[in-house]
Amino acid sequence: MNGKLLIIGAGGVASAEFAKCCQNSKVFKEIMLASRTKEKCDALAAKWADKTDAKLFTEQVDADNTAELIALIERFKPDVVLNLALPYQDLTIMDACLATKTHYVDTANYEPLDTAKFEYKWQWDYHDRYKEAGITALLGSGFDPGVTGVFCAYAMKHYFDEIHYIDILDCNGGDHGYPFATNFNPEINIREVSANGRYWENGKWIETAPMEIKREYDFEEVGKKDMYLLYHEELESLAKNIKGLKRIRFFMTFGQSYLTHLQCLENVGMTSIKPIEYEGKQIVPIQFLKAVLPDPASLGPRTKGKTNIGCIMQGVKDGKPLNYYVYNICDHEECYKEVGTQAISYTTGVPAMIGAMLIMQGWGLNSGEAGTAAAGSPAGVFNTEDFDPDPFMDALNKWGLPWKECFEPVLVE
Ligand code: NDP
């Protein structure tokens, strides 16, 4: 491995991730930032150039175009491609990595542009082809999914014989002062929260209406918040990968103002992904809405407060019941001071950097299959919980997302 990373996308998450890669120039010796709008790449490179020993490069690329991606990968010859564009580009980028035999990492699973539905099937289907090509795909290396999978693998490795119940709690106690804005890409965010809720119990998926299940939880350093059950992509991989699991749910906090605005926007059709005709032109309402909402990148300087994201697990060890909560608390203003983004981008960008670093260094699987520093990790398509959690957990502490443990957590009813 030559320490060469190609990052695709230059939005909020990429801004935080790129800053962390620049700090980690012992591992990332050459970094190329390529995105649809090259000026954003140039601005980020200019911001960090005199604060890093890494060599920085920028390019324009259309990540919907596999041939263009292949040409870029062949020119730069990265060890790893880190996809921080949008979930719609996952498959074109995976195809380009396959064609050039280059390792692949992303933070969100594939979603077709015209159907608000995400599942791992499309990407898991690449497993045999990646294995044959001798390359690794690490899927969902953000916070959730990403760190949440690592937390579960860590609990399984060190504390439990079986985990029966997992509740993932994603709390954002940040306040940006706008009546309505989303903390990451508005289109992806609104598609996620306006979909039906879903959780997994006793081998079956149980569907709920959007925001139907509500709980209150008292989050450390944030306080009491209402949280709502959502479907989230790591439920699919963890339900498959965690031994003995009986139920897994995901909850996210939302304030009343956010929900009231969302409801109103939905009622008037502004969150629809179906194109409509407007003055002789086809427009997609949710894309138009994205254009009028504050750019998530602009929230950084105004957001105050903290995030608290983690997993509460219940299971057994040596025949005795055991409860365990592992979580990270992250401060929006501290993140902005350090890398120029709010905590949502930071908590995604740091694990994305760690995932790319570990794949480069030959991160081994939980199954015992080791990687090598020369060739990277074992070949195939994997989720974060498939890998040995220890190096990831150490890196979280080192790179800005320290975690805490509690063995007597308040459980979610
Ligand atoms: P942004 O919208 O801020 O950034 C997306 C970037 O991708 C933009 O720079 C955009 O270009 C670029 N892009 C979009 N389409 C293309 C294309 N066809 N070709 C090249 N570049 C393209 O999103 P975020 O940074 O907020 O999110 C990035 C990813 O992270 C998303 O997939 C999101 O779902 C995921 N995420 C994951 C989380 C986790 O915890 N796992 C949490 C939060 C986000 P342009 O600048 O021209 O618009």
Image: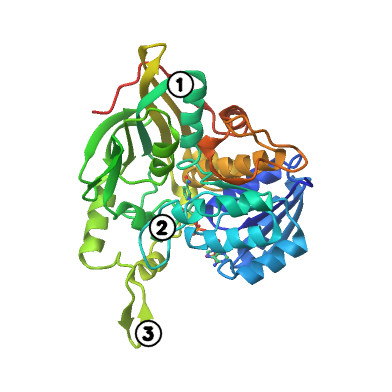
Mark sitting earlier along the chain (1/2): 2
- Secondary structure state at the residue bearing disc 2: helix
Left or right, 290 with reference to 334: left
Q: Using the rendered view, name the quadrant where residue 72 is placed.
A: bottom right
Compared to residue 333, the image places residue 403 above or below, namely above
Closer to the camera in the image, 162 or 142 = 162
Mark sitting earlier along the chain (3/1): 3
Q: Quadrant of the C terminus?
A: top left
Can residue 337 be seen here?
no
- Secondary structure state at the residue bearing disc 1: strand
Q: Classify mark 2 as within 8 Å of ligand 1 or not, answering yes or no.
A: yes
Q: Which mark is residue 84?
A: none
Q: Position of residue 347 (x, y in %)?
A: 51, 41
Q: Position of residue 99 (x, y in %)?
A: 67, 62
Amino acid type shown at disc 1: Glu
Specify few, some or many for label 3: CA neighbours under 10 Å numbering under 14, 14-19, or 20 or more. few
Q: Position of residue 78 (x, y in %)?
A: 73, 54
Q: State how far apart marks 1 and 2 are (Cα).
A: 31 Å
Do the CB atoms of the residues marked 3 and 1 lie less than 8 Å apart? no
- Secondary structure state at the residue bearing disc 3: strand
Q: Which mark is residue 281?
A: 3
- Residue for point 31% across, 38% down: 203
Amino acid type shown at disc 3: Lys
Amino acid type shown at disc 2: Ile
Which residue, given by chain and number where applicable, does mark 1 sit on? Answer: 405
Q: Position of residue 288 (x, y in %)?
A: 37, 71
Which residue, given by chain and number where applicable, does mark 2 sit on? Answer: 188
